[in-house]
Image: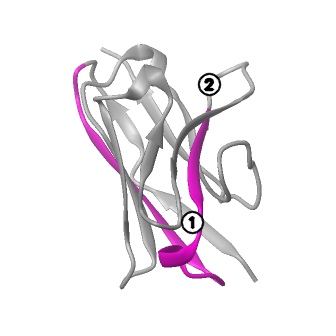
Amino acid sequence: QVRLEESGGGLVQPGGSLRLSCAASGFAVSNSWTSWVRQAPGKGLEWVSTIDASGTSYYVDSVKGRFISSRDNAKNTLTLQLVDLKSEDTAMYYCVKGPRGAVSPRGQGTQVVVSS
C-alpha cells in the first residue's frame, strides 16, 4: 500500500526558507517518478516539481531558482527545499507518487504560510 506523509510546513516571513519532507512507504522513491503539488486557498492543485526515475528534477517557472527537489533513496524520503519564499507560495503542499499531472496517491499535506 502506497503511503506518503508530509512534514515541515509552518509560518515564515517573506524571504524566509523552509524544508519540506515526505516519508514514502509501499514503493521505492529511487526508481519512481514523484512530484510535489500545492493548493493555495480557494484555488486548485498546482504542480510544483517532479523528480523522474533517473533523478532529474523539473520545476514550474514560478519556483525555479528558489525551490530544490531531492530524494534520499536510503531513507525513502523526498525533500522540497523552499528559499526566498513569497506570499504567493502560501499553500498546502503535497507529495505525490507519479509524474507531472498526477494528483494521487498523495499525503495529507503540510501547510506553508508566508506572511509578515
Residue drawn at the location 47% of the way across and 16% of the way down: 88
Residue 47 position in % (x across, y down): 61, 35
**Local crowd size for mark 2, using a 10 Å CA cut-off: few (<14), some (14–19), many (≥20):** some
Question: Tag count in the figure?
Answer: 2
In the foreground, 32 or 76: 32
Residue that mark 2 sits on: 40
Which is more N-terminal, label 1 or label 2? Answer: 1
Identify the residue at horizontal 41%, vertical 15% (top origin): 87
Nearest the viewer among 76 and 101 is 101
Does 87 appear above or below 16? above
From what the image shows, is residue 84 above or below residue 36?
Answer: above
5 displayed left or right of 8: right
Provide the residue span drawn in magenta.
15-38
Helix, strand or loop at mark 1: strand
Image height of 85 relative to 103, above or below: above
Please identify the quarter of the rendering in which residue 96 is found: bottom right
User: Which residue is drawn at the image coordinates 65% and 44% (left, top)?
Assistant: 100
Mark 1 = which residue? 5
From the viewer's perspective, tell me whether residue 67 is left or right of residue 41.
left
The amino acid type of the residue labelled 2 equals: Ala
